[in-house]
Image: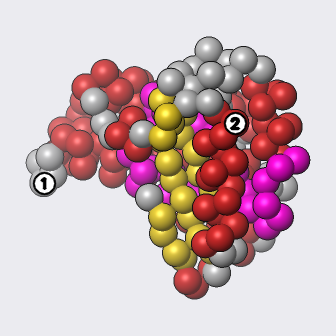
Amino acid sequence: MLKQVEELGKHIVIAGFKDVKIWNVKEFLNIIRKEKPLNVQIQFFDARFVATWQHLYFAALNALTAFENKSNISKSLAMESMLYASAQSQIRKAMKLLGIKSNMSKIAVLVIGENLESVTSALSLVLKQVKGERDDTILKLSEEKAIAIRKIFGISDVELETVMERDRFEKALIDLVIERVALLATYH
């Protein structure tokens, strides 16, 4: 998924990867940091808890807005995106919930940059380093994934049923996760 956010002068790419083989997360992230294009931010997420590409897209928009308004919690746009995606105001909690770990086989990546060339170049770098297969279908909701997402975001049956009165289950769940993402901005 590629979107241009004209009003903020940014391009956003969100992708999923399966059969990922990252043995040492710290080493992997260091390689990505060193080799990524300038003016590009990259953040990785545990795909098991990503409620479709919309979840990460709205986290990115909120993070960009926080930097624009100088209300950001973290020093980097990538980390701010993690905070919003996890609906947490503490980096440690956010990383524990949605950060990548060495035993993961499915990850999601968010790339934010100033132009199309830099974000596509960064995505190519990620593809080379994850030693996995690009597969955006892992971002979709499954029954198992929905249960896990509801648990980590504290979405109750009552809350879901209230929203589902007007929407179908998948849309209701995505909307509630995005609502959690947006609420983080009200906490600081």
The colour style of the image is secondary structure
Q: Secondary structure at mark 2?
A: helix
> Badge 1: few (under 14), some or many (20 or more) residues near its Cα, within 10 Å?
few
70 relative position to 145: left or right = right
x, y (%) of residue 100? 64, 28
**Does dot 1 land on a helix, a strand or a loop?**
loop
Q: Which residue is mark 2?
A: 129
Q: Quadrant of the C terminus?
A: bottom right
Q: Residues within 10 Å of mark 2 (few under 14, many from 20)?
A: some
Residue nearest the observer in this picture, 58 or 165 = 58
Residue 96 on the magenta segment: no
Q: Quadrant of residue 135?
A: top left
* Residue 53 covered by magenta stretch: yes
Query: Would residue 173 appear left or right of 21 to someone viewing this image?
Result: left
Which three-letter amino acid code belongs to the residue tagged 2? Gln
The structure residue drawn at horizontal position 31% and vertical position 36%, both measured from the top left corner, is 141
Residue 113 seen in render: no
Judged from this view, the residue extending furthest toward the top is 103
